[in-house]
Image (spheres, rainbow, N blue to C red):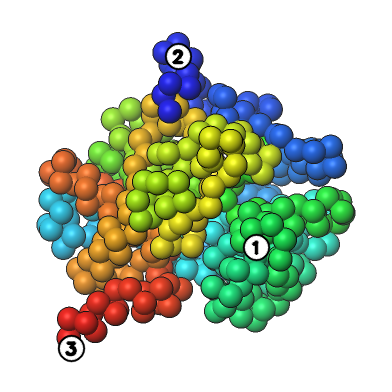
Amino acid sequence: MTELLNAAQRASLLDDMIHGRCPDAQGRFGPFGGRYVPETLVHAHERLTAGVQRWLSDPEYQAELNEQLTNWVGRPTALTFAPRLSERWGAELWLKREDLAHTGAHKINNAMGQALLARRLGARRIVAETGAGQHGVATAAACARLGLPCTVYMGAVDMERQAPNVGRMRLLGANVVGVTSGDRTLRAAIDEAMRDWVGDPDGTFYILGSAVGAHPYPYLVRELQAVIGREARAQFQQRCGALPDLVIACVGGGSNAIGLFHPFVGDRTVQILGIEAGGTGPGLGQNAATLVGGRPGVLHGCQTLLLQDEHGQIQETHSVSAGLDYPGVGPEHAALLACGRVRYESASDDEALAALKECCEFEGILPAIETAHALAGAKRWAQANPGKRMLLGLSGRGDKDMPTLSQTLIKQLDAVKS
Ligand SMILES: *Cc1c(COP(=O)(O)O)cnc(C)c1O
């Protein structure tokens, strides 16, 4: 996507990204980001932007967030050296363990941060969207903790595919509403949550689950997830006395990746690599590798890269991991690609499942299938960079993926046995 910008524009965007000047006041990361929303949504976004400016760096808000992250979420999460995979793959592998955070993934960092912000802004109820259900579960848990009523919009197709998470959300007190419009998956659920929010932007707060959407969401989510990278950078330096050679994470909407990457963007000796869902192949509709195969466009209020056909129709995506199955990506990743600071590659369904199995067998950790894409990317990078040190964002645990694993890896184990 480097052809999007000429050499001078690339250099200037790189300088802005490295020195923390993005997003600008309009929410732009170079040519990406911004706020492309209908008139009905402008007031709600402006009110939220003012709230973010007022509270995000407020010492009392920060202290309240820290207290919840420490005593309820379980932060800081561990940094784990992976000795057996390091030996197999030929480069040192260090895991930042977001699977150990409450509710089993990084999503809780953002959900709790936004729920606390909602309370400061006087919200009486919360709405959220969810695809695979992980963000819905994290939001329902944060709302239960703070005593806020919570409605989660979820595509009817996803409700069927992810039935256990629907039950979890309901146990946590959320009202789960099935969305039967549009594609009946995540895209339609986001539209429906937005519609609910604009009906009452003063009393309702919309907790968006990834670093996507209109300004200020990509910025807000990055700031709340950057705790991952800040902790990991300090832990890594303390344990190794140096910075890693590579920082790597999986990219769906991009929240766990931007959270890990952000504190390393200015470290010129550190390579950064994002891994997208390569699905079953490179054709349109076969994958969700937006940065690898996408073109510029607007989705959910933001200029970014999108998987679309030659007429600009957004494409259906495929991935074995529901959490990476989204045709867009956060604008900050599009900018990090365009300026050349971060490289993005994809890992296929099969590569991810193979890496997941290795992580189970050799490290005693069952990662989420989303996370397994990053492991597959790390394995590939290690082979080309023997002896170097990798820091990998282990975004979540794989217990939620047992239905999919039963149909794939575990079937293969059974076949070998019989
Ligand atoms: C939701 C999810 C992802 C993908 O979302 P990002 O916003 O790209 O981080 C990755 N890993 C896990 C475990 C998830 O639950």
- Residues 259 and 28: in front is 28
Q: Which residue is mark 1?
A: 184
Observer able to see residue 393? no
Residue 84: x and y, percent?
Answer: 16, 63
Relative to 379, residue 262 above or below = above
Name, please, the residue furthest toward the front: 311
For disc 3, the neighbor class at 10 Å (few under 14, some 14 to 19, many from 20) is few
Q: Residue 263 placed where, x, y %?
A: 44, 38
Tell me if residue 173 can be seen. yes
Kindly identify the residue that appears in the image at 43 percent across and 58 percent down.
319
Q: List the residue tagged with mark 2.
A: 6
Three-letter residue code for mark 2:
Asn
- Residue 369 in percent (x, y) is at 38, 64
Lower position in the chain sequence, tag 1 or tag 3? 1
Residue 11 point in image, percent of width and height:
43, 16
Q: Are marks 3 and 2 in contact (CB under 8 Å)?
A: no
Give the amino acid at mark 3.
Answer: Ser
Q: Residue at x 58, y 75 (%)?
A: 160
C-alpha distance separating marks 1 and 3:
40 Å
What is the crowding at mark 2: few (fewer than 14 residues within 10 Å), some, or many (at least 20)? few
User: What whole-number distance in Å separates the C-alpha atoms at marks 1 and 2?
Assistant: 39 Å
Say whether residue 232 is left or right of residue 51: left
Q: Give the quarter of the image for residue 362.
A: bottom left
Secondary structure of residue under mark 2: loop
- The residue at which mark 3 appears reads as 418
Q: Residues within 10 Å of mark 1 (few under 14, many from 20)?
A: some
Q: Decide which of tag 3 and tag 2 comes sooner along the chain.
A: 2
Decide which of tag 1 and tag 2 comes sooner along the chain: 2
- Is 325 above or below relative to 329? below
